[in-house]
Amino acid sequence: MARSKKRKSTRSQSTVTHQNGNKWLGKISMFLVSSGIFVALLGVIYRYWATNVSLEFVQPIGNAYEFSLKNETPVDRTVKMFRIVPPSVQKVAYRITEDIYVNLDDQGRVILPGGNVSYIPAVEFKELDGQKIPANGSLKFRVPPLSSRSWMAPEAFIVDVRYELEPSNSVLAIFETLLDDIGMRSREQTIHYMVVENYWTVSRSDFVNDEAIRVFCRDNEAMAKSNICAPKNP
């Protein structure tokens, strides 16, 4: 009989403790809801999940270009990688912006000073790696030219911009890595840009390698019958 009474007493204490715990949880929940903290937390979670970092072309700066990364998320982010990657196969057009002396070969073809192959400084741009962008903030930066020659400006050019960002907080970075591994959220982004008359616009064409030349030939009557445009204009 004594053992039976002891078990009943233990069960009674456990029930009271459980009821007290439920009351405290209820009070905490009511406080969060009534104070607006719960709604604010939901808003932060939603913004974290639904928003992202966007890339925006601002303007040409001489031969270079100004861009802006806008962090619309509620957490600080770090740039892991930012690269300018022109497709290896594409038709391009450049405009000569200064008077220069050229040579002609035996077949009458024009040879530019230094040769007709131009180096693209933008592909070496890595200065953004490791930079931090504050929550709800932005970061403006300069992208190098698409030609190492100051007297050449791109008239028709396709460029891929690839970048990857992660939360500056290590715990959130691990969480996003898991989401990336299971395919729920990709941290690496690729944007196809069409550079026409030295101005960058996002291209959503399925034929991105030909899009810049097509637009250039369409908008430039003087060049429409040139060799570079003629195959596209039967």
Image: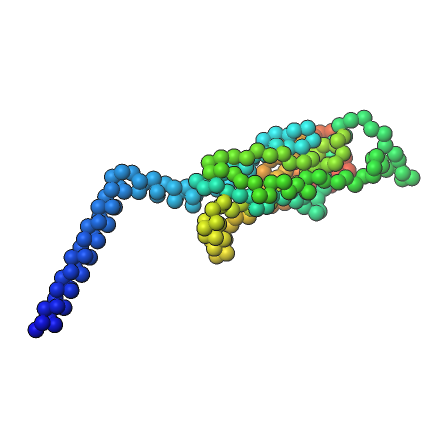
Quarter occupied by residue 224: top right
The percent position of residue 193, horizontal first and vertical second, equals 61, 39
Indicate left or right for 191 with 223 as reference: left
The percent position of residue 159, horizontal first and vertical second, equals 65, 41
What sort of colour scheme is used for the picture?
Answer: rainbow
Residue at position x 64%, y 42% from top? 126
In the image, farthest residue toward the left: 1
In the image, farthest residue toward the top: 99
Rendered position, 214 above or below 16: above
Q: Quadrant of the N terminus?
A: bottom left
Indicate left or right for 87 with 175 as reference: right
Indicate left or right for 185 with 32 as reference: right
Q: Nearer the viewer, residue 64 or 93?
A: 64
Q: Nearer the viewer, residue 104 or 141?
A: 141
Q: Quadrant of the C terminus?
A: top right
Residue at position x 59%, y 46% from top? 81
Residue at position x 49%, y 45% from top? 167
Rendered position, 189 above or below 222: below
> How many circles with numbers are drawn on the protein?
0
The percent position of residue 145, horizontal first and vertical second, equals 69, 35
